[in-house]
Amino acid sequence: MRPLLGGLLLAAGIMICLTSGLCSAWFVGMLLFEPNQNGAQNALGTIGLVTVFGGVPFGLGVLLFALGRRLTREE
């Protein structure tokens, strides 16, 4: 039962990391390639928001991945 639960946690962690990472990269890319009038101040604010809202799910995905890997490797 542990390998099954570990595999499910691995899959969930990978999917959460992948989706939050792609979403964060999309918003940072839009910020870098979109002409803005406020300059660096706007860029730093947006990067901060991306870090807060994209970093928490990414960290949760890494935690789930690590827990699932630990469960699958235990004997």
Image: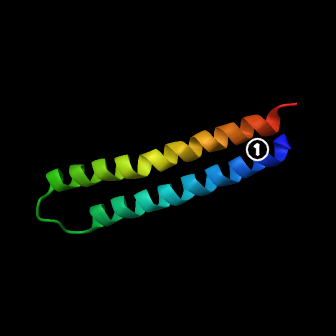
Q: Residue furthest top?
A: 75
Q: Residue at x 35, y 53 (%)?
A: 50
Colouring? rainbow
Query: Left or right: where does residue 65 sit relative to residue 1?
Result: left
Residue closer to the observer: 38 or 61 = 61
Residue 20, given in percent of the width and then of the height, sits at 49, 56
Residue 14, given in percent of the width and then of the height, sits at 63, 52
Residue 73, given in percent of the width and then of the height, sits at 81, 35
User: To which residue does mark 1 refer?
Assistant: 6
Quadrant of the snapshot with the C terminus: top right
What is the number of callouts on the image? 1
Q: Residue furthest front?
A: 1
Residue 24, given in percent of the width and then of the height, sits at 41, 57
Q: Residue at x 18, y 55 (%)?
A: 42
Q: Residue at x 80, y 39 (%)?
A: 72
Q: Amino acid under label 1?
A: Gly
